[in-house]
Amino acid sequence: MEARDLRQALVLRPRRYPFGAWPWRAAAYLASGTAAGALACAALLVLLLASLLLVGIPLLLLGGVALGGPERLRLRLVDRRPAPDPHRVPGAPGLGAWARVRAGEPATWREFAYGLLLATVLWPLDALALAVALGVPGVLLATPFLLAADGHETKVLKAVLVTSYPPALAAAVLGALLLVGLSYPLGLYAAGRGALARALLAPRDTGAADGLGEVIASRARLVDAFEAERRRIERDLHDGAQHRLVALTMTLGLARLDAPAGGPLAERLARAQEEAGQVLTELRELIHGIHPQVLADYGLGPALADAADRTAVPVDTDLGGLPRLSAAVESAAYFTGREALANVDRHSGASRARLAGRHDGRVLVLTVEDDGRGGADPARGSGLTGLADRLAVLDGTLTITSPPGGPTVLRVEIPCRVRSASSSPRTVSSSARD
């Protein structure tokens, strides 16, 4: 594959990407990053203890320099472009001259910052990405072998009990499909990690400001690519795995008709058909969560109205006249609104909520208000912190006003242009569920 880096491989050869070398290179990059980060974390703890004796402070700074070289080499796993050493050659020999030059270089401080990030934040994220993209499909693929090893039953992902081979094979098929599908977000995450490493460890010669601009632009491109791959995965699961599971369920039903009534074979076939039906239901929920079809077909207004209709708390909606916007904007606004409505259900204790959206030609404004108990704090893990970061990539903002006793008001603003005509032909201001 003639691709300069992982990001180009995802964009230029999306269909062949899962079956090439790049997914393995991405996994190797993240696995080695996990190991390097764990070692850096241990070294950081030792140096922090040594700094109490005033000997660890310079070692902390120079530790970033020692880490930078191997990290630039490791970057070649996901980015084939050379990552040159940004350090200057000292003008005089000796350790003192070398230390003075290194202490005065911006590159040294950038490597120090990257070392802190790797030791505290990045390596757990790398491990989590590998666990989701490889661990979950791997467990599903291993279901038939685990069942054979036990001889009677096995629990898939500690949740679903499997006692016969048809559902075990169905789980393995689902695992294979997820392994292929999740290779795309795994590659996108690895590409983002590589972009961050390059920005800090091998910045462009035009300066730090230009490098930061490139990082911001790459984040925006990754958002667009992620949305495109999200829709591709949804289509693949809908057109492939879902149809096969439906066919499997029908085949099991036909087999039950041929089996002797009341016998052990009929009972096992019934159990297998039930398990296949549950897997099909879970797959449909997964597909809807990846990218709801109503959002792609009809736009943000109908998609948010559908989300409001699924909310247990009655929701008044005012979404009329929302135009079609870019896919990234519609997706970010939809998932933010859906998460806000989920928080209303789970945490607010509200008896009623209101969801409103408008676009004034320049800015999309989305508000979610409820009459609950208030006191909401995103820092306590409401699920909105990650969405706020995603909105920031689009130059959007998310603000929450939630005094004790309520009401709670969430407001989203995203600067964006109109893509096409209105997605909601009329204004709706009524209860989604009476």
Image (cartoon, rainbow, N blue to C red):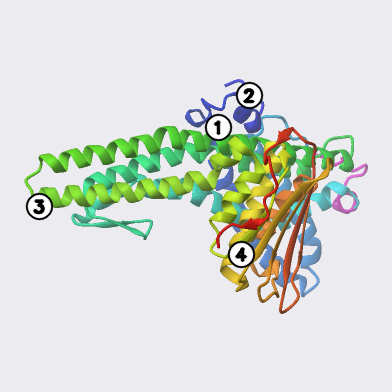
> Residue 22, labelled with which disc?
1
Q: Nearer the viewer, residue 141 or 392?
A: 392
Question: For the magenta stretch, what is the residue range?
Answer: 85-103
SS state under label 1: helix
| Badge 1 or badge 4: first in the primary sequence | 1
The residue singled out by tag 4 in the image is 343
Foreground tag (1 vs 4): 4
Q: Position of residue 352 (x, y in %)?
A: 63, 67
Give the mark toward the camera: 3 or 2: 3
Is 217 left, or right, of 38 in this rendering? Answer: right
Which tag is nearer the camera, tag 3 or tag 4? Answer: 4
The label number, if any, that marks residue 264 in the structure image: 3
Q: Residue at x 57, y 24 (%)?
A: 13
| Proximity of marks 1 and 3: CB atoms separated by less than 8 Å | no
Q: Nearer the viewer, mark 1 or mark 3?
A: 3
The image quadrant that residue 113 belongs to is bottom right
Is 93 within the magenta? yes
Which residue: 52% across, 30% down? 21
The CA distance from mark 3 to mark 4 is 46 Å
Numbered circle sitting on residue 3: 2
Amino acid type at circle 2 is: Ala
Q: Residues within 10 Å of mark 3 (few under 14, many from 20)?
A: few
